[in-house]
Image (cartoon, grey):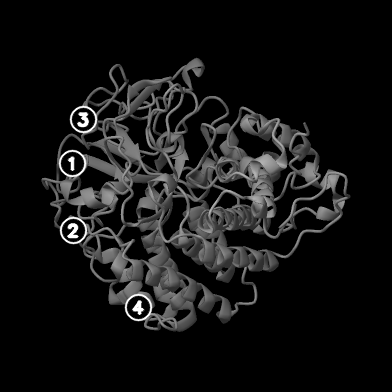
Amino acid sequence: MKKIVYSIVLTFFWMLSGCEDYLDKVEEFEGLQQEDVFSDIQLASDFLDGAYTRLISETSARDHRSDWLPGLTMSGEGYPGRLGLNVPETYSIYAQGDYLSLMNRPSQAQTTPYFVDRYYEGWKGIRTVNTLIEKADQIQNGTQEEINGLLGQAYFLRAYFYHLMTKRHGGLVYLKTNLDLNASFDRERDAYENNVTNMLADLDMAIDLLPTSWNSGGYGRPTKGAALALRSRITLFAASPLANTSGSQELWEAAASAAWDMIDHANTTGLFQLIDASDAINMDVDEGGADLFVSEPVQLAPYRNMFVGPGTAKVIPQEVIFMELNSLFDLPGSSYLNPVPRLSLTVGFDIIKGNTSPMNIGTLANFIAHFETKNGLDIEDDPSYNPQNPFINRDPRFYNAVLFDGVPWQHTVGAINNTGFADLALVNEDGRRGLDLHDPATPTSRLWRIMNLTGLRIRKWVPNGAFWQSGNNGLFDFYVNNIHFRLAEIYLNYAEAANEAFGPTGTAPGASLTALEAVNQVRNRVGMPDVNPLYTGSRETLRERIQTERAVELCFEGHRYDDLRRWKIAHLEEQTKVEFLVMRWQGGPSATYPTGFSFVIEEQANLRKTFNERNYWWPIPSSEIAAVPSFRQTPGW
């Protein structure tokens, strides 16, 4: 019996070995003829499911490893706290802008970050998708609705794979059919603009074919809404200065219309809406306020529960358009947590005790400056803001995103910090270094310990009380949602594109919201006031406010690095510097130091990132060029 021969996507040398690896993972197809797999609707569906295992977004993991950019550090949102096992040694490589060295690392190398995995896995996923599209007409025992559902997923996935690759590397070859292994490959890379045209054509097909919603058996699969959300993201990227080198207004208009289509879909179907947490503005977070030092304020629960919460039952929040299928922290029979990416990128030694994989990225002082005061003003514009009391009266989302010194936090039994509170002061009330901070006296043999270096931890993706010691040992009665698309992003996409195309008070054709009103909807749902008139007087001032709003609302969700790139501002000094927050006990509260601590923002000059023009688009592995010279390296590399 002839086995299926799945044509690989490209004839590049790395793909020759990759094909065998993939077939090993879907061994149920071994020994089957093509007509057997693609005549049965369930086997065809199972085959397409293999493509999802290749999808590495900012929220995804390949096997048990996430896509270690890490985007959080490249974007200036944070800095890693693990000093052993080449971390943050590899930080210096990408901080210096040497992306080619990282792209040339073997995909399976036991080092981080895994720069190249998305590129390799993306091509493999495209190969799977193309095979399904080619063979779908052979399915005999499925209804047209079932077959359309498979095709809709396939077109969505192909567009998503290409978006994930092209937003980094620029234009590639858009393959709609798999290439013959025996055929020569001498094609050149296509222009990014042409790739966008093909992605949008695929999404048009997906929107027509995908259902508005799935039954319970379709959980974790894209819907029409997901395809509309992806179209919004792609058109926004294409309209932005990085890709839109001509400054075309038509591209901004198309991006505004694409975002509005998704908002209108949400309104029409009633399936998606912004989570209402407007009571959060009433939290008492003034000096000595009852809610200031609370691990998870109850007024924030509706908003926070979108990201993390108690219990392993998976409930899709109404704001979420598409997220990964991750039902439990602990997968039965596995030796890793699910979802690892969110947890391991943001927790400290107290939660992942002694494990050697997590990065523990602490947020930075210069990043949290993006959070306004609850009065709706930048901290430098609000006379009530005191840099010696920086945690009080901030935007409610600050208390969901940032874990600061003194907040009660459950810790692992036997952890270094067993005080029950985040201890992040360089000199605490006892005159000692905070127990959550890295001690420079740590022996080299213990540098794998995951400690904080920045003086600020990330709260957004860490359920209070979760911990992982090793293997399956720990407390996992929590969920963490790996979200691909949520409605707040689409409102902000619309606001940005509408502002650029029509100005702050303009609307896209057929839309009922202005750019400014769209931003305000996102702010108001946590009780924040409308954007202050200080920031709304022109397209330029509102542009800056929208950029700040994206930093706050979408923080630590994998957006900011690509935002900085597409806005062409990643090279600016304010984006390349790294600043830690240093707290020192001053003996007690005083007029100068209301909390008893001094707060000093210290730049880490040795950690400053280098970002040049060539870093805006990534290279591809050098082996690709050696195998197929006509494919061409990314300009500048």
Task: Nearest to the eye among marks 4 and 3: give it.
Answer: 4
Residue 64 % position (x, y): 51, 31
Q: Earlier in the sequence, mark 4 or mark 2?
A: 2
Q: Nearer the viewer, mark 4 or mark 1?
A: 4
The N terminus: image quadrant:
top right
Q: Choose between 40 and 98: the one closer to the eye.
A: 40
Q: Picture coordinates of residue 247 (x, y %)?
A: 60, 77
- Which structural element holds mark 3? loop
Cα–Cα gap, marks 2 and 3: 30 Å
Identify the residue at the far front of this view.
Answer: 141
Image-based side of 340 in relation to 623, left or right? left
Identify the residue at horizontal 64%, vertical 29% (top origin). 27
Structural distance between the alpha carbons of marks 4 and 3: 51 Å
Check disc 3 and report the residue beneath it.
Answer: 429
Residue 14, picture quadrant: top right
The amino acid on which the numbered mark 3 sits, given as a three-letter code, is: Glu
The location of residue 396, given as percent across then percent down, is 24, 55
The residue wearing badge 4 is 513
How many other residues sit within 10 Å of disc 1, few (<14), some (14-19) or many (≥20)?
many
**Amino acid type, residue under disc 1 in the picture:** Phe
- Residue for point 55% across, 64% down: 234
Above or below, 438 relative to 42? above
| Alpha carbon separation for disc pair 2 and 1 | 15 Å
Q: Are marks 4 and 2 in contact (CB under 8 Å)?
A: no
- The type of residue carrying mark 4 is Leu
Q: In the structure shown, which secondary structural element does the residue marked by tag 1 occupy? A: loop
The tag earlier along the polypeptide, 2 or 1, is 2
**Kind of residue sitting beneath label 2:** Ile
Specify few, some or many for label 4: CA neighbours under 10 Å numbering under 14, 14-19, or 20 or more. Answer: some
Determine which residue is flagged by label 1. Answer: 293
